[in-house]
Amino acid sequence: MMSCGNDCRFAFLIAGAILFVGTAAVGAAEPAWESLRHEPAPWLLDAKFGIYMHWGVYCVPAYKGVWYGKGMYQPGSDFYKHHVETYGDPKDFPYDRFVPMFKAEKFDANAWARLIKASGAQYAGMAVVHHDGFLLWASKINRWNAGNMGPKRDCYGEYVKALRAQGLKTIATFHHIRTFNWYLPDTGDFGGELSPKTAEIVKKNGWSLSDPNFNDLYWNELAGGKYDDFLKEWQAEVREVIDNYQPDVIWFDGGPFRTGETQKYALNVLAHYQDSARKRHKQVEVLNKLPTTMKFNFPREYGVLTFEEGRDRPANMDRPWVDDMRIDDRGWCYVEGQQYKTANEVIDGIVDRAARGGGLLLNISPRPDGTVPDGQVKTLQGIGTWLNANGEAIYATRPWKIAAEGDEKKLHYYKRWWHFDKCDGSDIRFTRSKDAARLYVVVLGWPEGGKLHVASLGDKTRLADGPIKSVTLLDGGKPAQWTRNAAGMEITMPEAAPQDQPAYAFRIDVEGKLDLGE
């Protein structure tokens, strides 16, 4: 068995019992980390499952992923070879030529929102701007935006309106802190300083990257761009989204948020977000990512910690957290030929995360015309069907003193990432109701012989103040027969239970309160 641990229990005692009202706290926020620290918004702790998407100009080439705009200017790379073979030399077909091809002609915000609602997600949104710097909202800050070019629609604005009509909360994710020098060859994943070869490569190839007329898209030093000017525009763009759309959650991809001048602008943005929420009496949240630098974007005490694909996340955390994970096998955005995770795999991951005190932000990848591939729709509908029947064991729950039972090693990919494609009837997870009146036991597959043996719940384990009153299979409300001894608890699967479900959730009602191991 795997315990949640004292740190995990302490974190959720604070988050679940005190219920501090997130960034809606009284008093204006100051642009300083000490002023911005806060407890997580309770609604996000309850939500467990959200969806966002990578959708933009990079979907047009639909090759390898969101890094196309950088890779096509890196001679020798697969991106560069593909671009030359498919579209021609970047001198004759620069990245900006893709912008009018991103038409979103079949984009239907209401259809998207209905799909999200059907999936069981509690909040949703999109990557409103990626490293390429193209904005998916109607902006007055920069001409390279969806309201002015390409779709010529306020894509994010329409989507936010549709999501709220479905009763869902919203998220906006920002990835453009990397845009400065990002397009240039040999500048690294985060843009940054120019290599000695960069200017020579760009000049030799005659690329428009160094053309000052395009510096508002390709932002870089060779075109005369200044980093401080870039940061001022970055700040103005984030504030514009905050003011115009009032997202309930914001998230930033990795970047130098705590270094030099960048930190000043980051603090100004976060203070503005927090203060504008306070004035509207809203509970908003910031997701605090751990990039490959192994240093969180912001101080660890700030926001809800976030891990890409669960990378480098320990099994037990002392703070609430969220994994962001893609539905596809490569690219983050739509890529020709990509495969999709099954509903079973995603559901097992949602259950495991809920048991450990976390949540999932799932990324989907629509085509450039705005349609969602059938494989993704099937997965989302499957998740929603399961959550509709078993959501009581997930939504608004908190970790119990024991998080999991089963082989944890098979959940790790190269020891750094979490994957859930190998879960089965030997994997058991535990959650509890916030009032500690009910324990939930979820098995991630059909147990062998139709008998679920739960070693963690033997009669030597103190469950509650009083005895067990009943055990019920949530799907259909079917009572289950059970026995309990020193070896564990054995639950007999109800005869009417189908054997092809992704997971099976049981509610254990007890006399009094559950023992939380505090």
Image (cartoon, rainbow, N blue to C red):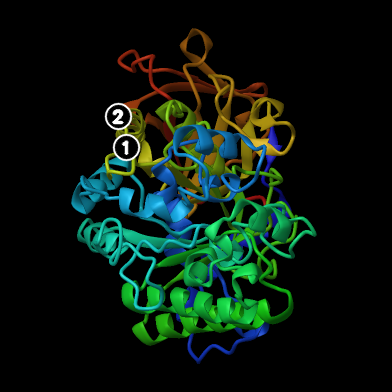
What's the amino acid at mark 1?
A: Gly
What's the amino acid at mark 2?
A: Asp
**What is the secondary structure assignment of the residue under circle 2?**
helix
- The residues bearing labels 1 and 2 have C-alpha atoms spaced at a distance of 15 Å
**Residue designated by label 1:** 384
Are the residues tagged 1 and 2 within 8 Å (C-beta)? Answer: no
* Residue lying at 66% horizontally and 71% vertically, measured from the top left: 257
Whether residue 17 is situated above or below residue 514 in the rendered picture? below
Where is residue 369, by image quadrant?
Answer: top left
Q: Position of residue 266 (x, y in %)?
A: 60, 77
As rendered, which of 61 and 161 lies closer to the eye?
Answer: 61
**Residue designated by label 2:** 374
As rendered, which of 144 and 401 lies closer to the eye?
Answer: 144
Q: Position of residue 1 (x, y in %)?
A: 69, 32
Q: Quadrant of the C terminus?
A: bottom right
How packed mark 1 is, by other alpha carbons closer than 10 Å (few <14, some 14-19, many 20 or more), is many
Q: Where is residue 162 in the image (x, y as percent from the top left)?
A: 22, 58
